[in-house]
Image: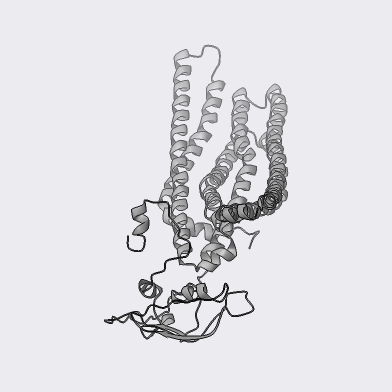
Amino acid sequence: MAGQLKLGLIARYLRPQRWILLRGALALVLVNIVGVSLPLLVQRTVNELQPGFSLPQLLQQALIIAGLATLMGGVRLWSRLLVFGAGRQVEVTLRQQIFDHLLKQEPGWVQRTGSGEVISRSTSDVENVRRLLGFALLSLTNTVLVYSFTLPAMLTIDPWLSLAAISLYPVMLLVVRVSGGRMMGQQRQQQRDLASLSDLIQEDLSGISAIKIYRQEPTEEAAFSRLSNRYRDAALALARTRSTLFPLLEGISSLSLLVLLGLGTSQLANGNLTLGGLLALILYVERLVFPTALLGFTLSTFQTGQVSLERVEELLRREPAIQSPVQPEELHRISRPGGIEAHDLHVRYEESSSDALKGLSFHVKPGELVAVVGPVGCGKTTLARALGRMVEVPAGQLSIDGQDITALSLDDLRSKISLVPQEGYLFTATLAENLRFGRP
């Protein structure tokens, strides 16, 4: 799956923006129709420059060419606004989907995955998806249209000279094919290293007090240096591939222009080609040079976006380990709520070889004030988490007001629980908003 085009996945993301993209595609078609017409007008104007030509006629042709060029620039700008705007809208929607999905995950998953990995996928990977669905899509579509409109026009002027001018382009496509897989692997490695680096920064900022108390600054500095160097090496490897590929593609594109000039001047001297025809071919080759030279960067952006799309989809496909039952029980409304009962309660964390709570049984009556005490690691925090199903609890082992907590929806269950953590956390908001967090 990693090396394949995810066209179905890309289409699913673009489907809500299909009408905007259709208008953008039509605008690109109009741009290319005008772009193909301009060299033909130049050809006709130059060929008509015979002794006795009329200056007003020449100015009229120049104004027509200038007007069409201005129209082409305006429509091109409009097409970019449409396509880039669609990419931005997908980015906004995707960020909201990821955020909503993350809120459904159990707390332990973020700790196991690493907050840096989650943040990296939610930020830089989403931006790469936006570039894929905006810039890369626009550039690839424009490249296809440029070739589709330009090559037939070139062949009508001089088939053999046109084929000679583009004879080097298969070499260019071969270079892109060879370098494409390497760039995708290097991009994937760079994303992994960036996530590891972000994870370390997040952990160190969260635990800065412990780092200072135990004087572990040198250890953390060494760890940061190691991960930073690894990310640097991955970025440099990708940069070396790109810096080799892009100039090579530009050089091949420029060589095709030199071939055209060399052979075209001979055809012109032999009388087999008009000056206007040669100028038109030069303009057509120039039209092909930019999208072809940009093809390397475009494919790099496309491949980077595919890697990021994989990572984002992997995040969105992850189902929460703790979910509401398919058919939850209705929450009982009683006059004196607050009764809690455990029957041989067992709780084990994922990847742990022993139970955090083993065979715990108790009964707390409504209105009772109960303190749970014990040494570090005996399961006090686990019990608090189990009451709100922050950790998975086996069915029938823990009930509130006579109802099995696994039979209730998470919203109903947690509406009955209030938890004051040992270490308070202030959100980036006013003090009043923090105090009203449970009931905003």
Considering every residue shown, the one lying at the far left of the view is: 335
Judge from the rendering whether residue 71 lies leftward or rightward of residue 232; answer left or right: left
The scheme the figure's colours follow is one colour
Asked if residue 139 is positioned above or below residue 219 in the image, the reply reads above
In the rendered image of this protein, does residue 341 appear above or below residue 306?
Answer: below
Q: Position of residue 363 (x, y in %)?
A: 42, 86
- Count numbered badges in the picture: 0
Residue 306 visible in rendering = no
Place of residue 260 in the rendered image (x, y in percent of width and height, measured from the top left)? 69, 30
- Measuring 32% from the left and 63% from the top, which residue is drawn there? 439
In the image, 261 versus 10, the foreground residue is 10
Relative to the observer, which residue lies in front, 327 or 81? 327
Q: Which residue is depicted at the point 44% across and 33% down?
A: 74
Residue 137 shown left or right of residue 335 in the figure: right
Indicate left or right for 344 with 147 as reference: left
Q: Is residue 371 above or below residue 421?
A: below
Q: Residue furthest top?
A: 52
| Rendered location of residue 315, percent (x, y) | 54, 62
Q: Position of residue 362 (x, y in %)?
A: 45, 86
Relative to 397, does residue 53 appear above or below in the rendering?
Answer: above
Task: Determine the residue positioned at 44% across, 57% down.
Answer: 96
Q: Quick one: 420 or 32, which is closer to the camera?
A: 420
Quarter of the figure with the N terminus: bottom right
Q: Is residue 210 at least partly visible in the picture?
A: yes
Q: Quadrant of the C terminus?
A: bottom left
